Image (cartoon, helix red, strand yellow):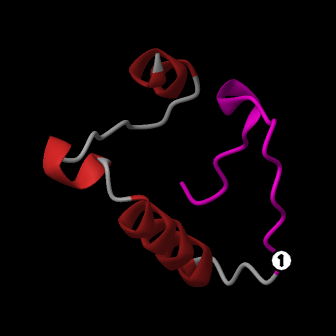
Amino acid sequence: MCTIMCKERGGKFYAPPNEVLVDNGLMIAWLGILQKEKKEGNIDIHPYERTDDVIMEWR
């Protein structure tokens, strides 16, 4: 699903090795790195947001 969504939006999808997929801390840290590089000051949490509704601003 992610590969299809990224292709439709001109993005790239990369799945890390399985041994790090279960580490939510790692995924949260990576998101923080992306947001810091973008100089994102606001972090809004939307627990029921659909994956295909998210705008990828860091491309």
Viewer-proximal residue among 28 and 4: 28
Residue found at x 55% / y 18%: 8
Residue 20 percent coordinates (x, y): 23, 55
Q: Amino acid at mark 1?
A: Asn
Residue under label 1: 42
Residue found at x 54% / y 21%: 5
Viewer-proximal residue among 47 and 54: 47
Residue 37 percent coordinates (x, y): 54, 81
Asked if 33 appears above or below 31 in the picture, the reply is: below
Asked if 4 appears above or below 46 in the picture, the reply is: above
Residue found at x 17% / y 42%: 18
Viewer-proximal residue among 17 and 58: 17
Tell me if 23 is positioned left or right of 32 in this view.
left
Q: Is residue 55 magenta?
A: yes
Quadrant location of the C terminus? bottom right
Asked if 15 appears above or below 42 in the picture, the reply is: above
Residue 54 percent coordinates (x, y): 72, 39
Overall secondary structure of the magenta section: loop
Residue 16 percent coordinates (x, y): 23, 47
Residue found at x 48% / y 78%: 33
Asked if 54 appears above or below 36 in the picture, the reply is: above
Tell me if 58 is positioned left or right of 45 in this view.
left
- Name which quarter of the figure residue 3 lies in: top left
Magenta part of the chain: 42-59
Circle 1 Cα neighbour tier, 10 Å, few/some/many (<14 / 14–19 / ≥20):
few
Q: Is residue 46 magenta?
A: yes
